[in-house]
Image: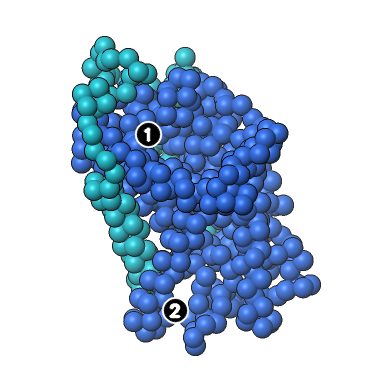
Amino acid sequence: MVKDYVPLLILAVVAAGFALTNIGITLVVGPWRPTREKMDPYESGMTEIQPPRQRFPIKFYVIAMLFLLFDIEAISFFPWAVLLRPLHFSGFIEMFIFVVALLIGYLYIWKKGALDWE
Amino acid sequence: MYALILNIPGPNDAVDTVIESLVKSVIALLLLLASFGYLTLAERKILGRMQSRYGPNRVGIFGVMQPLADGLKLLLKEQITPREVRTGVYLLAPAISIFVAIMAFAIVPIGPPLPWLGKVRVLAVANVNIGILYLLAILSLGVYGIVLGSWSSSNRYSLLGGLRSSAQMISYELSLGLSIVAVVLLAGTLSPMGIVAAQNHAGLSWFILLQPLGFMLFVVGGFAETNRAPFDLAEAEQELVGGYHTEYAGMRFALYYMSEYINMVTVSALVTTLFLGGWVGVGNGILFTLTTSAPWFQLIGVFWFFFKTLAFLFFYFWIRATLPRIRYDQLMWFGWKIMLPLSVVNMLATAFYVSLS
């Protein structure tokens, strides 16, 4: 029912209000004495030697894509999990076939080395 | 008893609903903030004792005023904003983090339904029948606060720390989700109230006993999800300074810190709800029943809930004092090659059992 979600909406308003108020407070409270060195990006106390925005390892993209694949499949387990009792053993067999298909893909990315971190 | 819990009459009056949820929201917020403050103190005290020292003991008796002193100090600090940050995203990121942390707690029932002012009221902010699905959705959003904060800081330590912790969180979220599937299989419902009821309708059948492997997977996943020791790689001082919040000072840093502790509270509350029988105490059915006792007597359920949750939080601190931080390649290897297959096997074994019963 839709009205079950009204409390979530109200909590969202309260939580967002709390978060934004806190961020707002940081803009007005506290001293503000900027100097050139203080406003540098942190670099272990050294002056900057390279621009801070750099490329980062592609590994992280691979992990993110694998996560998307597996997480979407993990979500599809939930309706099945609720309904397994009425579906009986045939429900188990069907999901087993799906998991085996998933497993083939998993073994493939494992053999390809996508899960190895150097 | 089972039927009563699943058929709680929803509030009919719109005004009543709004007032009730407003009161609950404010109570939940204050509860989380208070627990954040005193968890930081408890952590320092417990870690101190485990390392043969005292921990904070100067501000008030046993340091009880320490959280207030810390909060005030963070509030009055200079809010250093480095030159090259993307200001809008930089300011919004900690707000997203704390918002998500508060929202995740919404579906956790902290006690049995209680009659109050002419209606049976649920002791959770929201009693939705797809609570677990909502929870997974909200937990996934937690990554945004970290990724946006680390990227907008324009600092390579922040960026690397943020990448590390987001990759870690999404890797362990898979096995976390699959270990919850096993619980849902046994309970046959996605509602947290229903899961608590399913654990208590036939004597002592807490899911920690039926799902020992699932429990362990959930605990490890929960530790990784909250970026806590031994998975606190984002905050590896030797390599990455402060991790994703390196460039945050004062209250903005405090918001990140707050969301970390609130997430710990949420994970502990979830362990209690999903595996440790929720608000029902040991010896339920002998001493306390869900429905027949006097209404106020059922408040003992709230005590049990907090007892279990705090015991698990103590476990968090204990682990931090005991285990060293693991290496990043070991972390990814463990998450993808051990945790994920184990959680799939656990889920299939549970499904096999459930489909035959």
- B176, above or below A111, in the image: below
Same subunit, labels 2 and 1: the answer reads yes
In which chain is the residue bearing label 1?
A: B
Q: Residue at x 45, y 36 (%)?
A: B169
Kindly identify which numbered label has been placed on residue B245: 1
Q: Residue B196 vs residue B286: left or right?
A: left
Chain A, colour shown = cyan
Name the residue beneath numbered marker 2.
B10
Chain B, colour shown = blue
Q: Are marks 2 and 1 in contact (CB under 8 Å)?
A: no
Which of these two is toward me, B247 or B92?
Answer: B247
> Which amino acid lies under the numbered mark 2 shown in the image of this protein?
Gly
Q: Which residue is drawn at 34% across and 67% down?
A: A10
Q: Residue at x 43, y 32 (%)?
A: B165
Of mark 2 and mark 1, the one earlier in the sequence is 2
> Which amino acid lies under the numbered mark 1 shown in the image of this protein?
His
Is there any visible trace of residue B139 in the rendered image? no
Which of these two is toward me, B237 or B79?
Answer: B79
Kindly identify which numbered label has been placed on residue B157: none
Q: Distance between the residues labelled 2 and 1?
A: 42 Å
Is there any visible trace of residue A112 in the rendered image? yes
Q: Residue B355 vs residue B26: left or right?
A: right
Horizontal and vertical percent for residue A49?
26, 11
